[in-house]
Image (cartoon, grey):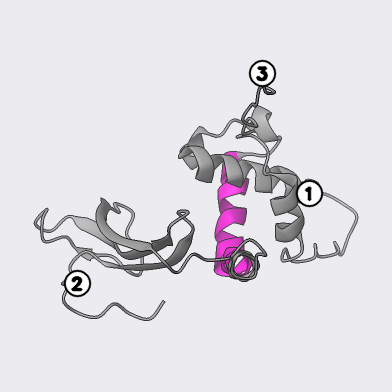
Amino acid sequence: MGEATTTPKMDYFRMPRPLWRKLKKYLPKPRKRKSAKGGRPRASERALADAIWYVLWTGCQWKALHRDWFGVSASVVHERFQRWRGAGIFEKLRRRRMVEYYARERGGISWKWQAMDSKHSPAPLGGEKVGNNPTDRGKLGAKINLLLVDERGAPLSVVLTGANRHDTRSPPSA
């Protein structure tokens, strides 16, 4: 009989160490405080990354995060996520991971087969790329206009547009 194989368990509460090492390279250096008096100590970047990982992996609401889980309040986690997103940190990390995936010795991206799909989803909080949703008559919505993956399911491209944009129009550049 062969050896029993087990699937490694995913720890939803901790970002995998190799991914954390890569993310850490893009994080801004903490600013020095001008005075030693007052204020809370700065939240741990690792704890924040773990909390963000948890929300993105599980779909948990930001406000549902418990301070006990990561030692950081939900509002600080969400604020830091928005700051990092605005600074393009996640986009830089995504690009680096794609370059690594392209260059992978075991073949990189499989160009033999790709799949593309689009989806409507509600966006009640709005945003820059939200418009009236024609299917819900005036309710706000967003649409993943383009999702392209290779045969292993690795995302190659994602483009978001307003739900009021007709599918026959070309999508905006990503």
Which residue is disc 2 drawn over?
A: 165
The residue sitting at 59% across, 70% down in the picture is 102
Near-viewer residue (58 or 115): 115
**Alpha-carbon neighbours of circle 3 within 10 Å: few (<14), some, or many (≥20)?**
few
Amino acid type indicated by mark 2: Arg
Upstream in sequence: badge 3 or badge 1: 3
Which residue is disc 1 drawn over?
A: 39
Q: For the residues marked 3 and 1, what is the alpha-carbon distance in whole angstroms?
A: 62 Å
Amino acid type indicated by mark 3: Met
Q: Secondary structure at mark 1?
A: loop
Magenta residue check for 163: no
Q: For the residues marked 1 and 2, what is the alpha-carbon distance in whole angstroms?
A: 47 Å
Residue 129's tag is none
**Alpha-carbon neighbours of circle 2 within 10 Å: few (<14), some, or many (≥20)?**
some
> Is 15 placed above or below 123 here?
above
Q: Which quadrant of the rendered structure holds the N terminus?
A: top right
User: How far from the left and from the top, in percent, is residue 149?
Assistant: 41, 61
Magenta residue check for 78: yes
Upstream in sequence: badge 2 or badge 3: 3
> Is 55 placed above or below 140 here?
above
Q: Secondary structure at mark 3?
A: loop
Near-viewer residue (59 or 87): 59
Q: Quadrant of residue 79?
A: bottom right
The residue sitting at 49% across, 64% down in the picture is 110
